[in-house]
């Protein structure tokens, strides 16, 4: 194909981008117009994918990390024959459109991950490249390259300024992810104006120092051959990720090109006419794609189907030679858990020793790790505290380090919580793997930029968060989570699980594994907890349940995690005073909310006051509890027993508050909190 045909395609993308944003009267024309050449070259001369089957396992992955330029992605997907019509493009950014304001993986065929919050996409790409390397090491056999594909990302100045991108670039360099290729849209412009305002470092030197292979293309507006060759060069370097700095002009073609004015608002009508005329198009035709341009992309699509058909053939031969591996491959990509997995989950009796839930979590991971080979993850430099590395685990490392290999499933994240969560999202988005990420519960605050996206993107990420309250003791307020659970519980599509003992730990993990379209945060203690009478794996599925106590109670005590055994003791004190109490364990408010109203009312019957106890902010408990014991400040540094006394989480403090609650409601009606009009 001649350069001129490529330029015609590229200019079609540019004019369409101007039309799409103009019609929506909202969006970002500048980056799509500037990035059109690199995107066109990437999709038509390098990437392998099949628009007919966007789920083909061995496709190259593409991430648009500067998600604001998504008009570009939608246009390319349309031209290439994915399930996006011209009419869909005309509904850009409108209600129920499959072309939303930023790319959403669950809405649009061919979109691998949700992007828009800058820095996340390129970090997801690191996760996708880790997943690819791991799958390759696990499934490829002699001549069979069942998995051998690339992860590509386009990113802009904004992504490169974000801290999370630095965290993940540093790890990607260490891990020598040779099949990760990033295309940097170096246009020297961002919203405030020139990058001279705040971004003057030598980006490629920084990436070189991270261990990346760096390249640059001087003229990213016209030099198609230069971009093509640079990507080819990048592919040849297999022991380092590559970044190609491509100098472009934002809004190329517009009278305002090269300025921040084309970043985030539509071009004016007459400017669009000018752009089209300049590129040799009819200035008055809107949403116009020349037939030969459609034909060009149709040919690319045909090639894509051919690539998949060849892969299918190769996979069929592989299946004959390695039937077990092939079956396993299919199971994993179908997202099915291994049969018989549940039997491996430990169960406990009340006579079993008191143990920290983080330790029970370690026991569980040891019991299931071999039976669940898709489990992959690690900790942000707290392995010995968080106890997430199972016996016999192999580190995910480049073989040259002598520390592990790519078939390893334990990832050493370093102290990079935000990057860890963003990478987990990428691994989750690859499919066939179940990522977990671990740190102290309080430090999930560092990662919320990404964990929020786990929820938005419907990804099953298991956050194993230890040291889950003031119960961590001496490390003090800097490490003690207070508002954390309320934040997580306020996040849609996120399961928060705070198990109270061994059975609940097993239940929490099983729920997390079975909920394949949302992340779970499992909050675990540092301190030992007794095994409770009445707990079970199955009870956790209901979110909250009656653990012990009276059928006709005067008061209900409800708690989570480490506070459950304390309310059990508080109830004993109340009993001595002739007050009957019911004990409710509430490992997950979200699961409880999903139960039938009649079940919820059976746990919290009308007319009986409820007192909640949780060593956290009480925010959120008022939907069940008439009174709450919780944390008002940030905690303190001391042995944890002293802190539980100081902040009122002892059986006697609780029984005293329970009596006050009963006293208060003696001559008042008890509101029925869980009654809902709709
Ligand atoms: C985390 C985050 N912060 C802020 C924004 C808002 N925002 C969108 S684009 C942008 C400027 C990005 O500059 P650049 O990547 O150079 O994009 P260009 O102007 O070149 O298209 C900002 C601040 C965002 N999307 N995500
Ligand atoms: C490859 O095989 C899958 C699964 O059998 C099938 O869905 C797909 O259509 C095939 N692709 C091609 C291009 O033949
Ligand atoms: C990876 O390392 C482990 C542990 O040393 C070893 O058992 C395994 O065979 C290695 N796998 C590959 C693919 O080299
Ligand atoms: C989450 O897991 C629970 C327990 O297995 C189950 O009842 C529920 O249906 C699951 N929800 C989703 C959305 O998968
Ligand atoms: C808990 O009880 C002790 C002993 O009665 C008392 O000194 C302390 O003030 C109480 N703490 C709180 C927070 O109520
Ligand atoms: C199986 C398959 O199609 N593999 C391809 C993955 O991508 C590289 C580079 O584009 C190709 O060389 C492989 O053939
Ligand atoms: C920092 C921290 O909490 N370290 C703990 C890690 O785990 C070991 C073993 O349980 C504890 O002794 C450390 O205090
Ligand atoms: Mg820019």
Image (cartoon, helix red, strand yellow):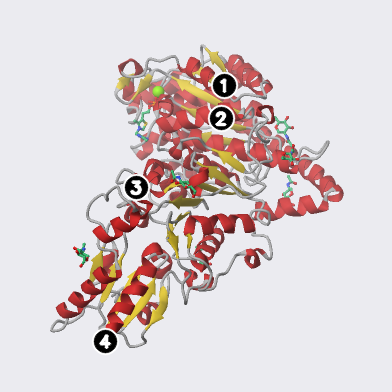
Report how far apart the C-alphas of labels 1 and 3 lie in the structure: 41 Å
Kindly tell me whether residue 112 is visible in this rendering.
no
Label 4, label 3: how many angstroms apart (C-alpha)? 38 Å
Point 63% across, 47% down: residue: 55
What is the secondary structure assignment of the residue under circle 4?
Answer: loop
At 37% from the left and 87% from the top, the residue drawn is 551
Q: Residue at x 52, y 39 (%)?
A: 423
Q: Residues within 10 Å of mark 2 (few under 14, many from 20)?
A: many
Q: From the viewer's perspective, is the residue at label 3 or at label 2 nearer?
A: 3
Q: Is residue 242 left or right of residue 90?
A: right
Q: Is label 3 in contact with label 2 (beta carbons under 8 Å)?
A: no
**Which quadrant of the figure contains the N terminus?**
top right
> Quadrant where the C terminus lies?
bottom left
Residue 145: x percent and y percent? 77, 37
Q: Earlier in the sequence, mark 1 or mark 4?
A: 1
Under circle 2, the secondary element is helix
Outermost residue to the left: 667
Report which residue position mark 2 lands on: 172
Question: Toward the viewer: 304 or 640?
Answer: 640
Image marks 1 and 4: residues in contact by CB distance under 8 Å: no
Query: Mark 4 or 2 closer to N-term?
Result: 2
Does mark 3 have its CB less than 8 Å from ligand 7? no
Which mark is nearer the camera, 4 or 2?
4
- State if disc 3 and disc 4 touch (CB < 8 Å): no
Q: Which residue is mark 4?
A: 578
For mark 1, what is the residue?
212
Q: 237 or 30: nearer the eye?
A: 237
Pick whichever of labels 3 and 2 is earlier in the sequence.
2
């Amino acid at each position: 194909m001649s350069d001129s045909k490529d330029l015609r395609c590229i200019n079609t993308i540019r004019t369409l981008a101007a039309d799409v944003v103009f019609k929506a009267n909202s969006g970002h024309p500048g980056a799509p117009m500037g990035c059109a050449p690199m995107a066109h070259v990437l999709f038509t001369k390098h990437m392998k994918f099949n628009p007919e089957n966007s789920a083909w396992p061995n496709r190259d992955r593409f991430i648009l990390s500067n998600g604001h330029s998504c008009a570009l992605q939608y246009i390319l997907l349309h031209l290439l024959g994915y399930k996006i019509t011209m009419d869909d493009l005309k509904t850009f950014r409108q209600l129920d459109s499959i072309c939303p304001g930023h790319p959403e993986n669950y809405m649009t065929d061919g979109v691998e991950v949700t992007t828009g919050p800058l820095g996340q996409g390129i970090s997801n790409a690191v996760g996708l490249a880790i997943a690819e390397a791991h799958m390759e090491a696990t499934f490829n056999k002699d001549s069979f390259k069942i998995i051998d594909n690339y992860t590509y990302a386009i990113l802009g100045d904004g992504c490169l300024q974000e801290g999370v991108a630095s965290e993940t670039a540093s790890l990607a360099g260490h891990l020598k992810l040779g099949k990760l290729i990033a295309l940097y849209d170096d246009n020297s412009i961002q919203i405030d104006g020139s990058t001279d305002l705040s971004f003057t470092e030598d980006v490629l030197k920084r990436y070189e120092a991270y261990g990346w292979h760096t390249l640059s293309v001087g003229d990213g507006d016209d030099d198609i051959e230069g971009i093509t060759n640079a990507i080819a060069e990048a592919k040849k370097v297999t022991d380092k990720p590559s970044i190609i700095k491509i100098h472009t002009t934002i809004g190329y073609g517009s009278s305002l090109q090269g300025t921040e004015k084309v970043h985030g608002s539509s071009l004016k009508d007459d400017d669009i006419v000018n752009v089209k005329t300049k590129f040799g198009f009819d200035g008055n035709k809107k949403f116009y794609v020349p037939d030969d341009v459609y034909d060009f992309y149709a040919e690319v699509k045909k090639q894509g189907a051919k690539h998949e058909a060849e892969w299918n053939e190769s996979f069929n031969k592989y299946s004959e030679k390695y039937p077990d591996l092939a079956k396993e491959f299919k199971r994993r990509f179908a997202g099915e858990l291994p049969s018989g997995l549940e039997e491996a989950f430990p169960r406990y009796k009340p006579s079993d020793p008191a143990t920290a839930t983080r330790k029970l979590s370690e026991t569980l991971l040891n019991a299931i790790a071999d039976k669940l080979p898709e489990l992959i993850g690690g900790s942000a430099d707290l392995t010995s505290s968080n106890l997430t590395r199972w016996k016999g685990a192999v580190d995910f490392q480049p073989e040259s380090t002598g520390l592990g290999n790519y078939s390893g499933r334990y990832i050493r994240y370093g102290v990079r919580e935000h990057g860890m969560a963003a990478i987990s999202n990428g691994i989750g988005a690859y499919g066939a793997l179940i990522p977990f990420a671990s740190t102290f519960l309080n430090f999930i605050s560092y990662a919320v930029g990404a964990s929020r996206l786990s929820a938005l993107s419907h990804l099953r990420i298991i956050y194993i968060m230890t040291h889950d309250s003031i119960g961590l003791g001496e490390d003090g307020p800097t490490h003690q989570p207070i508002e954390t659970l309320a934040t997580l519980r306020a996040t849609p599509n996120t399961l928060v699980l705070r198990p109270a003992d061994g059975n609940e730990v097993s239940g929490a993990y099983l729920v997390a594994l079975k909920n394949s379209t949302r992340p779970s945060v499992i909050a675990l203690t540092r301190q030992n907890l007794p095994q409770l009478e009445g707990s079970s794996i199955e009870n956790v599925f209901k979110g909250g349940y009656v653990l012990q106590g009276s059928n006709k109670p005067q008061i209900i005590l409800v708690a989570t995690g480490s506070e459950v055994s304390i309310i059990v003791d508080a109830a004993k004190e109340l009993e001595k005073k002739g007050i009957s109490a019911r004990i409710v364990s509430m490992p997950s408010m979200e699961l409880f909310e999903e139960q039938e109203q009649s079940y919820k009312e059976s746990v919290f019957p009308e007319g009986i006051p409820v007192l909640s106890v949780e060593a956290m902010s009480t925010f959120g408990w008022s939907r069940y509890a008439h009174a709450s014991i919780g944390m008002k400040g940030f905690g303190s540094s001391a042995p944890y027993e002293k802190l539980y006394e100081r902040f009122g989480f002892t059986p006697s403090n609780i029984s005293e508050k329970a009596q006050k609650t009963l006293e208060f409601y003696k001559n008042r009606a008890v509101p029925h909190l869980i009654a809902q009009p709709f």
